[in-house]
Image (tube, grey):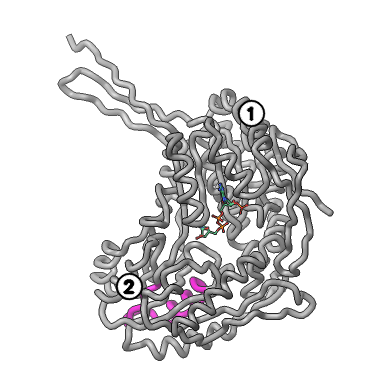
Amino acid sequence: MEQIVNYIDGAFTQPLSKSWLDNYNPSTGEVYSKIANSNAQDIAKAYEAAEKAFPSWSNTTIDERSRILLKIASLIETNLVDLAEAEAKDNGKPLSLAMTIDIPRAASNFRFFAQAITQFASEAHESVGLNSMNFTLRHPIGVVGCISPWNLPLYLFTWKIAPAIAAGNTVVAKPSEVTPMTASLLGKIISEAGLPKGVLNIVHGTGSSAGQAIIEHPNIKAISFTGGTKTGEHIARTAAPMFKKLSLELGGKNPNLIFADCDYETMLETTVKSSFANQGQICLCGSRIFVEESMYEQFKKDFIEKVSQLKVGDPFNAETNLGAIVSQPHLEKIQSYIKIAEKEGGKILFGGKRVTVANLEKGYYLQPTVIEVQDNQCRVNQEEIFGPVVTIMPFKTEAEALKMANGVQYGLSATLWTNNLDRTMRLSKQIQSGIVWVNTWLNRDLRTPFGGMKNSGVGREGGFEALRFFTEPKNVCIKYNNQ
Ligand code: NDP
């Protein structure tokens, strides 16, 4: 059976732990490869390689770093089909999605930061009257840790790695143990692109062993993490006494506010996507849908009709809209929330059941599920489910809609559907989330700040925000004689 091994110091290496984990194909429910179950010794080895590579990489010219990142981007594009197939197999997502979103975006991440680093500048402040000049140096931090989740495996892995290495850092990175395949393939690509050995070290394994060793490592001074809020809290608690720099991109429970004055057809089509793309396993999915009362019944009918047309099935079938849920435990978690909804008095308007796909009977398939709820305080509206499950409920006034939108611990993103400019401005200012989309969803410009408020995270990624995170500012103040 294929083994997914670590990529350390420019070479594919067996784990020192000599221990292995099963890697499942969620669309068949079968183990199809073994992953290195790395431990603290493996992380120490990766750290040593990264530390050794740092002095040279951090002194490599911006042009040279940029050239290598651009090469990685084009090699990702050259390998589009292989990478997309690997992602679909490992994660269960439709191949069409991996081909059009995940892998192209991984290439864009490298291309974007290859260009951004050439424009990244620091500030100078002249202290008039004090005869002094300040300028800010921005040095790379050193060895940094990047830890990513399973929902958009290569997309989010590279979203961290690209700015980290563009800024001159060296990296110890861990993808989710649930979806290690494309990160492993990236090892081959960076080596072909000529990234010097030790600049990027990819270590596989569980969060509690390999991940924990990264966050506990005393000399890994910055951690960029995307994952669940509970894990983020644990990371913050562990890293704080060591004064590590942290970027935490965490969970969400995003509201989708639909006003009667919106462009109805566009809203309907996009709301199906924002509810169920990637089986609802995108941190930005709009899982709480609030609809203005005057159009609620109409929306309910039309939305259910559209959702009922979605095809759940083999990720490799071009007709498939929803593939498999990423893992058996995650499927069970989602199903448990559907039961909770019923117990709480929620009405399942559509879905809620496991789907059996011919010839893939052991795969983890679930119907897209729409639940009508009565109260925003119910658990299915308060807790992140992270699956193909949305709730809907009506609202009477803008103030009520806003109160419900903000009435959760999370604050990642929000979507507004309205053609009223005044309302757009009022709500955009008052909604508690890091991102507000108006009459669109998942519309991303990589220059914009990305991240969440409240329990959805700390810090921002994207554009220069990411380059600021991965550099340490140092002010130099020079006094001069004006006589
Ligand atoms: P987890 O928090 O379970 O895991 C994320 C990563 O952290 C994985 O690589 C995991 O390893 C690792 N990890 C787990 N425990 C530790 C630890 N003690 N120390 C260090 N690393 C650890 O999240 P999921 O993978 O389940 O991803 C889903 C979550 O991610 C959802 O809450 C979703 O909202 C959030 N997310 C947020 C995004 C954002 O931008 N805000 C974007 C995408 C997802 P392993 O899995 O191998 O055990």
Outermost residue on the left side: it is 129
Q: Is residue 358 visible?
A: yes
> Compared to 321, does 116 lie above or below?
above
Mark 1 C-beta to ligand 1 under 8 Å: no
> Compared to 122, does 20 lie above or below?
below
Label 2, on which residue?
404
Q: Quadrant of ligand 1?
A: bottom right
Q: Position of residue 64 (x, y in %)?
A: 58, 31
Q: Position of residue 22 (x, y in %)?
A: 75, 56
What crowding class fits label 2: few (fewer than 14 Cα within 10 Å), some (14-19), or many (20 or more)?
some
Q: Residue at x 18, y 24 (%)?
A: 128
Q: Position of residue 238 (x, y in %)?
A: 48, 42
Q: Secondary structure at mark 1?
A: helix
Instruction: Give the position of the N terminus as an image quadrant.
Output: bottom right
Identify which amino acid the numbered label 1 is placed on.
Answer: Glu
Q: Secondary structure at mark 2?
A: helix
What stretch of residues is rendered in magenta?
A: 256-275
Mark sitting earlier along the chain (2/1): 1
Q: Residue at x 24, y 67 (%)?
A: 426
Label 1, on which residue?
48
Q: Is residue 224 left or right of residue 4?
A: left
Q: Residue at x 54, y 86 (%)?
A: 350
Q: Which corner quadrant of the image does residue 68 belong to?
A: top right
Instruction: Give the position of the C terminus as an image quadrant.
Output: top left
Task: Say the numbered circle drawn on residue 424.
Answer: none
